[in-house]
Image (cartoon, grey):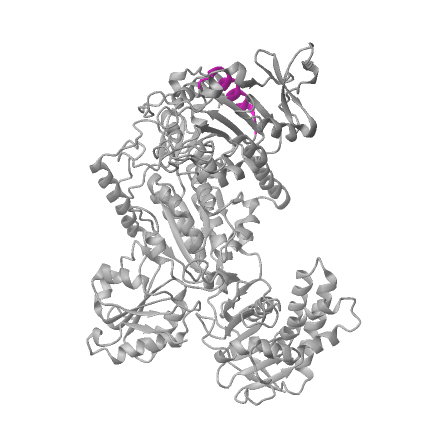
Amino acid sequence: MDTKHLDRVVIRFAGDSGDGMQLTGTEFAKAAAEAGNDISTFPDFPAEIRAPAGSLFGVSGFQLHFSSSEIHTPGDAPDVLVAMNPAALKTNLKDLIETGTLIVNTGAFIEANLKKAGYASNPIEDGSLGKYKVHAVDINHLTMTALDGSELSNKEKGRAKNFFALGLVFWMYGREPESEIRRIHQQFAKKPEFGEANVKVFKAGYHFGETAEVFQTVYKVPPAVFKPGMYRNITGNEAIALGLVVGAELAGKKLFYSGYPITPASSILHSLAKYKNFGALTFQAEDEIAAMGAALGAAYGGSIAVTASSGPGIALKGEAIGLGVMTELPVVILNIQRGGPSTGLPTKTEQSDLLQSLYGRNGESPIPVLAAKSPGDTFYCAIEAVKIATRYMVPVMLLSDGYIANGSEPWPLPNLSALPRFEVVHRTDPNSYFVYQRDPRTLARAWVIPGTPGLEHRIGGIEKDALTGNISYAPENHEKQTHVRAEKIERIAQDIGELDLSGAESGDVLVIGWGGTYGALRQAQQQLAAQGKQVSHAHLRWLSPLEPGLAKIVHNFKRVIVAELNMGQLRQIIRATFLIDVIGLNKIQGQPFKVREVVDAVEVQLDAKHAEPSAVATQSQASA
Amino acid sequence: MTEAVKIKLSKKDLESDQDVRWCPGCGDYAILATVQRTLATIGIKRENTVFVSGIGCSSRFPYYMNTYGFHTIHGRAPAIASGLKITRPELDVWVITGDGDGLSIGGNHMIHALRRNMDLKILLFNNQIYGLTKGQYSPTSAMGTRAPSTPTGSIDHPLNPISLALGAGATFIARAADTDAKLMATILQEAYKHKGAVFIELLQNCPVFNDGVWEGVKDDPAGKQIALVEGKPLVFAGGTKGIKLGAGLTPQIVDVGDGPGQTPVAEIVVHSERGSALYAHLLAQLVQPDFPIPMGVLYRNDKPTYGQLAVQQVDDAIVKQGVGDLNKLMYSGMVWEVGADGTRH
């Protein structure tokens, strides 16, 4: 048996949505993190909970990139594909690299499944997989054999087969099985008979790798070098929940979170509902509007109020967000974006709610909008959203997406005591109080909460007098208030950090991006810069107000590309703001950018840099 | 700190400095006056009192109360009030809504606030019409109502607010007419004491778009209203008529008395606020024109409120898990250390 060292591996597990591929992937990711690799994951699953077995649309996948050096993305193309049935093979094979390794569960390659996947003949036998390193293993049969004599029903036994696949890859990559065995027992503590069976099958898979002669090589991916410190593995939705709890603590206030179930935002509510001993109150509202309404009510009462949803729910919340704009109350709204329009692609990622976030309300209704760039970054964005909302007395929209929400990465744990506090103080002085009197720096009105004697006042959605807050229909007053509400958002720029720029402040091509595309864009820019190309990458954390640092550099490049997972929403804004031509790199497939797609698009512009921008296509199309 | 001396409030203390902008003759004036007078009598703390409303004529109410007030958006007041009450249980939160605001666009929030037994005092001004949008028929308008949107008469069946509140799970349900200051005051005092979801239907006159819609009830209180009194039979018309239950619990109007063809008072249904839900549903079905309508407290029931249970869960979690330690929370799950050499330890 050989041991071969690799710098990095991309592996994808694919099977029926009921096959447990998400669990398999998550567990293998834990093992990689435990072994000290840098990791990045990409769960990709259908909206159906248990789609019909063997169907093409029911295939669920989990991609893991683990490496001995720093990585930013879950990888462009898998080096290894584990296909639990013909449908999984059919839908995923096109992504596997040319010389990739393929592990197929032959037990599922029966006539009926082949037909469902649209195979005329069995690809394992007809030679069509010739260019790959194929390991044909009857996982179904070996799972049943491993559970010979078990009391479980055949159906229950069959469910353990993902653990066979997990055991096999554990062996292939030289992972220690002991801690996984402990984890399985822990996870199934309430149903020990299942835990026992899963461990048996996991071991069977591991030993199969060891004894079957086909697996002659163990691949080792040595640990990556990280900055010293404490780490944990975290998904975007876990980190955002922690950020909210910490944000409320830094503000010295109680957290109130209201939500209505929606993919991919629901798990934030699940996390926070467990944090009751932190004083966090959670409320599952009757609908999206009520979730936003309850958050406004809590904000009015003096809580750090948060609600979350995805595009369709944000649409429903729009009117109530407008009430927050008018009454100038601090609320944090999380939009975990998914593919749209309408129900769209509930479990897939997209960045198509940017314009909705910026403008999706009636009237002139500006709000601050920021976007997280990675799972761990959601923690800091959540804190920043709480800080800006309370400092400026305004609803803040924080954008994440399905890719960030469900993806995970090793996360350096922050030193909580080093995080600056932003203690909220409610006005209690009744002398010369005017409801819409403003702080000269932030233009925020005072946050006076019910229960304060002598400051009783009324607020509401009708236009308010710029000082007293009484109902006012006066023409000049409305214009003045409209301008003040807009200027308040612009003033937030004074509290925004430096622009995140990689590369020089001038050059041939500037790539601008925002949100979850950060990893792919940054990696592409670094690759090109390493080849001596004059390419820079500006990542925008704040979309409203637009990062102030952008104005200084945006005119210094021959070409500007805005790369985003939509039809060019930020591109419109950059064009309108700076009156420059901008080339769009757009992908609307419910999938994140691959690094290669970005590199290719930039290279096209580098080649064409001497021509007028209009001479080349102003919109690159990411390849499928 | 010593307890502040309780200062006696007058109605005037609860009037804000804003001009009241309802139409002359609107039933809302009478309701506003009674609410102000009653709350002053009760001796509420102005700073701990919040009026939350939606959109519509009635929803301008908070602007006229010298308490905290939040005039929100159409139909959503119960949701906004819920968020406030959950997080600030010590406040008295009143919700002002109308038949369009509370039962049409905001119907969903209404039923869920009641279902959760949210500790809110909801006053629904029922004038059977949309006033602020100029007179369209509402979900409580009688069938056949002619309005700008229904020139040949409305063809949908009206909703019974009391039945809805009962079905949704309100724990205090009452009804009064806008001009019946005495009854409304009594109800408000009882409602103030109640812990849980209060639903009060106020029969309110819109002099502009639906003038006199309740006249059939108000012009003859003795004949067309049953004054509900705890432990007393459901009688009206000076005690000469009463409600008896026939086969299948069918309510019947009977002459009360011991003479021939009369029903002895012992056979008349006796009112109990804490009676069965079945009884309360039966009361809700006593509607015009077939029956006189019951006025007063129809139903009352003590159940834990949403707020009490939510706070209880937080308290229990703190007892069981201890006060949350943020550092511990951050370090939960799989945590590892990377040493000075940059690799995992």
Provide residue B167's location: percent of width, then percent of height. 58, 35
Provide residue A224's location: percent of width, then percent of height. 50, 73
Front in this rendered view, residue A266 or A106 = A106
The prevailing secondary structure element of the residues shown in magenta is helix
Q: Residue furthest top?
A: B259
Position of B186 with respect to A620 (left or right) is right
Provide residue A520's location: percent of width, then percent of height. 40, 70
Q: Which quadrant: the N terminus of chain A?
A: bottom right
A328 is within the stretch colored magenta:
no
Front in this rendered view, residue B262 or A596 = B262
Residues in magenta? B179-195
User: Against A230, is B9 above or below?
Assistant: above
How many numbered discs, if any?
0
Provide residue A320's location: percent of width, then percent of height. 40, 43
B189 is within the stretch colored magenta:
yes
Q: Is residue B187 visible?
A: yes
Q: Residue sitting at 57 percent across and 35 percent down?
A: B117
Q: Residue sitting at 53 percent across and 18 percent down?
A: B224
Position of A579 with respect to B216 (left or right) is left
User: Against A538, is B87 above or below?
Assistant: above
